[in-house]
Amino acid sequence: MTITVFDSTGRTGRHILNLGVRRGHRITAFTHWPSRSRVRRGL
């Protein structure tokens, strides 16, 4: 499944990203603050 997350650096967005990655989903994340994100590619 592909999941798109908006505001991926917020509290809920980070939680959804972590769950999706752990479950093996493909994640597309958008954020207003790229400097706050931890980029993880190819997981």
Image: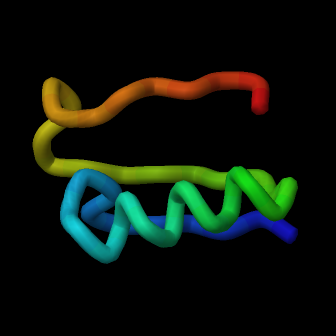
Residue at the (15%, 25%) spot, across then down? 35
Q: Quadrant of the N terminus?
A: bottom right
Q: Position of residue 42 (x, y in %)?
A: 76, 25
Q: Is 6 above or below relative to 42? A: below
Residue at image point 68% right, 63% down: 20
From the image, which quarter does the C terminus lie in?
top right
Residue found at the far bottom of this picture: 12
Q: Is residue 37 left or right of residue 27?
A: left
Instruction: Decide if residue 1 is on the left or right side of residue 40.
Output: right
Q: Quadrant of residue 33?
A: top left
Task: Identify whether 34 is placed above or below 5.
Answer: above
Q: Position of residue 40 (x, y in %)?
A: 56, 26
Work out whether residue 29 or residue 24 is closer to the camera in this orientation and state it.
24
Task: Judge left or right: residue 34 versus residue 43.
Answer: left
User: Which colour scheme appears in the figure?
Assistant: rainbow
Q: Quadrant of residue 25?
A: bottom right
In the rendering, at what x and y percent does residue 18 appear?
55, 56
Label tally: 0
Which of 2/13 is in front?
13
x and y percent of residue 27 in the render? 65, 53
Who's the residue at 31% across and 75% down the image? 12
- Residue at 77%, 65% in the rendered image: 2
